[in-house]
Image (cartoon, helix red, strand yellow):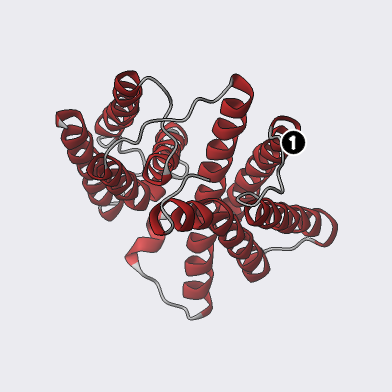
Amino acid sequence: MTIVLIATALYLLAAGLLVVDLRHDRARGHTWLLPAGLAVALHAAAHLLAWRGSGGTDMHFFAALSLVGLGMAAMTTAVGASGRMRALGVVVFPLAALALVGYQSYGHVPPEPLGWRLQLHAWTALLAYATLAIAALLALMLWLQERALRRREFHSWRRALPPLVELETLLFRTIGVGFILLTATLLTGALFVADMFAQHLAHKTVLSVLSWLAFGALLLGRWRYGWRGATAVRWTLAAMALLVLAFFGSKFVLELVLGRAD
């Protein structure tokens, strides 16, 4: 519990320092980097200690949510250190802290034994969700910046965001990486899951494939037709909504509503 409290405090400290840096237009301010890095390390340690105590990898709803938050925080810290994407930390770090507290508060569920193949599938899925969740936040940032430009609103927060073209390029690069990871998730699922269309997996599989098709269509539209702006935002958010329903929506209903594992 001590590790969780310290990690939560460090996440919030990093977010606060980022707000100060961005408000004062400190383009190269890195005061947030150390607490963010320590928070990510302690977040990972909290999971490792829980798994050591339970004898296996815990992948229930709150554990998966916390791991996705950890992945998002780690990516934001790593890429934000170069000055790109660091504004995301204002949102990502508190979300990661909240997910970690939820995981700790709910308690640790005895893990089901998983072979290395299913573990590879699960970890690839979590990494894909974290990457595409970052893309969804970038899409929201792009939408806010474009709307402010159309309305000729010059808010101070706009200085914290990358230029519009750079933000859009970063969005599509992130989607590209996430699409590759999502493809690997579906492939490992097809290869290693005994029956992907079993009772508890059919809706998850269908929604995941629909999300994959939506992200693929967006990347194709970008390459072939130059899709950008509002079109890119709509497709990104719609595809991400399908992915959230596929994984967390199904886990929420099965584990927290119906009280059984998927």
* Image point (49%, 66%), residue name: 145
Left or right side of 23 for 118: right
Q: Which residue is mark 1?
A: 187
Which amino acid type corresponds to the residue marked 1 in the rendered image?
Leu
- Picture quarter with the N terminus: top left
Q: Residue 204: horizontal and vertical position, in percent?
A: 63, 52
For residue 163, say whether it is visible: no
Neighbor class of circle 1 (other Cα within 10 Å; few <14, some 14-19, many 20+) is few
Within the image, what quadrant is residue 210 found in? bottom right
Q: Residue at x 40, y 44 (%)?
A: 86
Q: Estimate the x, y position of residue 82 in percent, counting from the top left.
A: 45, 34
**Residue lying at the far bottom of the rendered structure:** 151
List x then y, in percent, for residue 95.
33, 50
Residue at image position (78%, 60%) is: 226
User: Is any atom of residue 41 visible in this view?
Assistant: yes
> Relative to residue 164, is residue 1 drawn left or right?
left
For label 1, the SS is helix
Picture mark count: 1
Q: Is residue 106 above or below residue 254?
A: above
Q: Quadrant of residue 187?
A: top right
Looking at the picture, does residue 85 appear above or below residue 127?
below
Q: Is residue 142 left or right of residue 102?
A: right
State the residue in front, 146 or 254.
254
> What residue sits 53% from the left and 55% below the top?
250
Where residue 219 sits in the image (x, y, percent)? 75, 53
Q: Residue furthest right?
A: 224
Give the camera-side residue of 234 and 122: 122
Q: Does 118 sit above or below residue 72?
A: above
| Front residue (pair 106, 131) | 106
